[in-house]
Amino acid sequence: MEENQGYVMAVFKLLGSLGLLIYGMRMMSEALQKMAGPGLRHVLAKMTTNRVTGMLTGILVTAAVQSSTATTVMTVSFVNAGLLTLAQAISIIMGANIGTTLTAWIMSAGFTFNITDFVFPAFIVAMFLIYRKQHRIMGDFLFGIAFLFLGLGTLRQTGMDMHLGENEAVLRFFSSFDPDSFSTTLIFLLMGGVLTMCVQSSAAVMAITMILCSSGALPIYQGIALVMGENIGTTVTSNVAALSASTQARRAAFAHMFFNVFGVLWMLFVFHPFIDGVCSLVGDASLSVVLAMFHTAFNLINTFLLIWFVPQIERIVCFVIREKDDAEPLRLQYIHAGLMQTPEISVLQAQKETAAFAQRVQQMFGKVRQLSAEGDGKAFEELYRQIEHEEDLSDRIEIEIAHYLEQVSDDHLSDETKQKIRQMMREVSELESVSDACYKLARTLERKQDGGKEFTPRQTARLQEMMDLADSALTQMNVIMGGHRSDHDIRETFRIENDINQLRQHLKTENVQAVNDHEYDYAVGTLYVDIINELEKLGDYVVNVVQARFGK
């Protein structure tokens, strides 16, 4: 009875330790991403000029954030946002597979010597840091790494206490598989993939494998088969994340799976000789070191083999995942509910969506200009209905982007990212005001049409001048929204706004004189001034958008 209770407690310890390890990895990874902040986004977006720099970027980013899943999901997000090409994404994902091998070496260190003695001082330091606002993220990082090593240390001790290498039931189970059989390798490969899919953590499966191998319960060949299965299982995360994303994003996720599956396939042909070579390379080192060395060697060689065939891989994934011709156009282009991202990267998605919203608003203004030139008839009615529909869509887009930003802001974010979210909230609100101004212009034009009123040639020419300036303001706004704010000057926007204000004042004065001189009646003058005033308000909203973009 006591023996059974002991095993139950050991299992609880094992599961609890795994929970600590997974939580520690996640906490450490998120803290590192927050510390890297915008720099991480810029590195991924810019350091991909060719396949080699793309691969190196994947290695560096994954080694920095300690999560190949995070790097892969970020990369898929960037493809979805149109910031990376598919070829660039493939090279980054290849590098991520190398970068993640550092995790295996950290695990190996945890199983080679007892590191729990160093954990508690880290908890103390982290506790002090987390209550200091400026050092909060560093405190989170220390907590994460302390939880990670505490989990590893507890796992190691629990494995030793369970005496798995002496447990007859465990030994009987593993010895029932022929270590030289190809079917055994496939079974453990499948087990590794399923376990990784279930726990959504390749680090946890690696830790379990190291416990079993270090205790002598699991032969090294089966242990390495589990690691190979983990390489496939970890690709499921990015593929599930990309299900509701764009075609290019789904292709990037599938390329990750293709890369890992291809590696496993060629490894199956040289399985035993390759492992024997790794064992001879590390000599008398522990089996946890053998697993880490295999993981590193496998991913290095697989990347070296495939890095030269990125264009061919791109063609394959494009052939497998076709464009959906009959798919309905998405209202939001870059934000997708099913696409998992880290909070810092989610901000970039929202920035791209906000920029697309700005372009949409300018297109709506283009339709207003068309409406002002249309005569009577169905063409006018159809164009007016389109503008009305665009206004309704703009209201929804504003709400959806704002809701998305609210969800992102619930996470623990860096101060700079919080500031970006506040700016974007203001941007989308002001863009919706621009949309409202366009709709009000359309309604005024409809009133003019219904009343049978006509503007004089001079009025029409003056309105075109005003609309040209408003369009210039919108164009400048979109240039700023689509680039990095440090590359642009806000003074050009103010100059255009000043021109709009001066022209409005001049036209209003002209209108009073024209009405007094009976060039046209008061009703026509009122409609004319309403349009002028609304165009001036539109210019004000554009300035507000640009000021929000510059954080003013």
Image: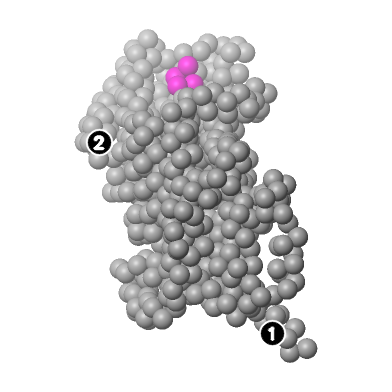
Residue nearest the viewer, comparing 347 with 400: 347
Q: Are marks 1 and 2 in contact (CB under 8 Å)?
A: no
Q: Which range of residues does the magenta coloring cover?
A: 366-370
Total number of numbered labels? 2
Taking 41 as reference, is 357 above or below it?
A: above
Instruction: Name the residue: 54% across, 31% down.
Output: 248
Whether 325 is among the magenta residues is no
Q: Main secondary structure of the magenta part?
A: helix
Residue kind at label 2, given as amino acid type: Asp
Dividing the image into 4 quarters, which one contains the N terminus?
bottom right
Q: Which residue is mark 1?
A: 6
Q: Nearer the viewer, residue 427 or 484?
A: 484
State the SS at label 2.
helix
Mark 1 / mark 2, whichever is N-terminal: 1
Residue 383 to residue 116: above or below: above
Residue plotted at (61% across, 54% down)? 221
Q: How is the image coloured?
A: one colour
Q: Which mark is residue 52?
A: none
Please give the residue where the numbered disc 2 appears in the rendered image.
487
Instruction: Report the mark closest to the observer, 1 or 2.
Output: 1
